[in-house]
Amino acid sequence: SGDAIWQELPLGTLTIQEKKASNGYHLNPKMFVVPLGAEDVEVPTIKVMESCIKLELIKYRKDTREVLAGAQFEHIRPNGTSELYTTDHDGRICLKGLERGEHKLREVEPPEGYPQSKQVIELEFFITEENKIEIAKKTDAIKTTVLKDGNLKVEVENESGYQLPKTGAMELICLQIAGSICFIKVWKGKKSI
């Protein structure tokens, strides 16, 4: 539940400071000072708002930087579990509460009219003793940034061009037969001079 309960505290001043953040959260550097006097009957309650680690992915067209909605990505967490996310109308996905370790993102469905990226985005980070995020490993071709607020930003470029429709072998054979029949009829209909 995240509750820390102390009983029978001595009179004086209680100082509380987080020393290690929960996995997926930033360390809260604030120090809480609570005076405990003889007249205090109520136990003081301190509410600490946790700040989770976020990763923002932005998908855009390489040549125009136009954002691309509708791309679906699979996020594979360090523990091996995965979840699907789809870029919104701003071409963005926001992953919250990222635990330390290696994360993978791969496109499973491209935006309509675009080719699917085969590249797997790999990103591993850790948190330093100074409470800063450091990137230990990342996919070189992908722009990855640690923002001033301590969160991560990944920019994914999509090549322009349209995805060709999928065709099967049967359609190709039918087209070849139809073309051959037309060619034979035209060829037989010609007279030599």
Image (tube, rainbow, N blue to C red):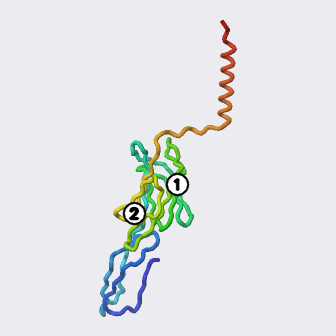
In the depicted structure, whether residue 162 falls above or below residue 119: above
Disc 1 versus disc 2: nearer the observer: 1
Q: Quadrant of residue 174?
A: top right
Q: Amino acid at mark 2?
A: Asn
Q: Amino acid at mark 1?
A: Val
Q: Residues within 10 Å of mark 1 (few under 14, many from 20)?
A: few
Q: Quadrant of the C terminus?
A: top right
Whether pointer 1 and pointer 2 mark residues with C-beta atoms closer than 8 Å, the reply is: no
Q: Position of residue 24 (x, y in %)?
A: 45, 69
Looking at the picture, tell me which residue is in the foreground, 140 or 149. Answer: 140
Residue pointed to by mark 1: 120
Residue pointed to by mark 2: 151
In the depicted structure, whether residue 134 falls above or below residue 115: below
Q: Position of residue 116 (x, y in %)?
A: 53, 46
In the depicted structure, whether residue 178 falls above or below residue 159: above
> Which mark is first along the chain, 2 or 1?
1
How many numbered callouts?
A: 2
| Residue in the picture at 65% in, 29% down | 175
Q: Residues within 10 Å of mark 2 (few under 14, many from 20)?
A: some
Q: Quadrant of residue 19?
A: bottom left
| Residue in the picture at 41% in, 90% down | 7
Question: Real-space Cα distance between discs 1 and 2?
Answer: 21 Å
| Residue in the picture at 32% in, 92% down | 11
Judged from the image, the secondary structure of the residue bearing numbered disc 2 is loop
Q: Position of residue 78 (x, y in %)?
A: 53, 65
Looking at the picture, tell me which residue is in the foreground, 177 or 89. Answer: 177
Judged from the image, the secondary structure of the residue bearing numbered disc 1 is strand
The disc at residue 169 is none
Tell me: 57 left or right of 37.
Answer: right
